[in-house]
Image: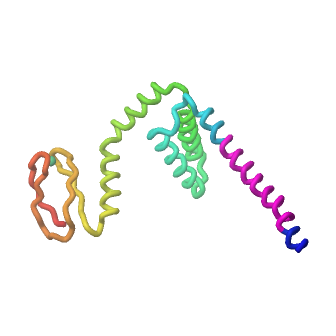
Amino acid sequence: MIQVGALPGESMPLMKKEVNDMDKIRQFGNQMQYRMAQFMYGRNGLDALARTCNWIAIILLVINLFVQSGIVYLLWLIFFSYSCFRVYSRNIPKRYAENQKFLDMTIVPRRYAKLAKLQWRDRKVSRYYICKSCHQQIRVPKGKGRIEIRCPKCNERFIKKT
Ligand SMILES: [Zn+2]
């Protein structure tokens, strides 16, 4: 009886300690998150242009694993630094304007990239086309053979094999 009573008493402080450790870790995590948020307050953060530069930097880094070129390294440094500069920049209106300009300039490739993504996702059921006269995206069920497609926006007709 005494032993049974003593066992949980002995294990209790240990469990309590584990809980305390977990609390400490959680507290530390919260603190870090808070500090990070405080640090990022009033800064531009990761916008589309910064993210694109970051991706280019990662690709350059991978390429440099194979080619070991000083030029590739320099390009990586430029893209990486520029991406960091954007993320931590405090001049938000200027960065915002640059990002908008970037989005406007890349509207066509971004549209095609989005289309390719959809095309891949729905490859078994649908096909996507872009109207040549108004650039409207049109979805057509797959496997209907050669059909005439009419653009719902501008009524342009074209024939495609689905
Ligand atoms: Zn159209």
The image quadrant that residue 118 belongs to is bottom left
Magenta span: predominant SS is helix
Judge whether residue 40 is colored magenta: no
Compared across the picture, whether 158 is left or right of 87 comes to: left
Whether 162 is drawn above or below 33: the answer is: below
Residue drawn at x 66%, y 43% as measured from the top left:
30
Compared across the picture, whether 68 is left or right of 139 comes to: right
Q: How far across and how far down the image is residue 117, in percent?
A: 35, 57
The image quadrant where one finds the N terminus is bottom right
The residue nearer to you, when weighing 46 against 56, is 46
Whether 58 is drawn above or below 161: the answer is: above
Residue drawn at x 11%, y 46% as measured from the top left:
154
Residue drawn at x 11%, y 60% as measured from the top left:
159
Q: How far across and how far down the image is residue 88, in percent?
A: 57, 33
Compared across the picture, whether 48 is left or right of 10 comes to: left
Q: How far across and how far down the image is residue 96, in percent?
A: 44, 30
Stretch of the chain drawn in magenta: 8-31
The image quadrant where one finds the C terminus is bottom left
Judge whether residue 10 is colored magenta: yes
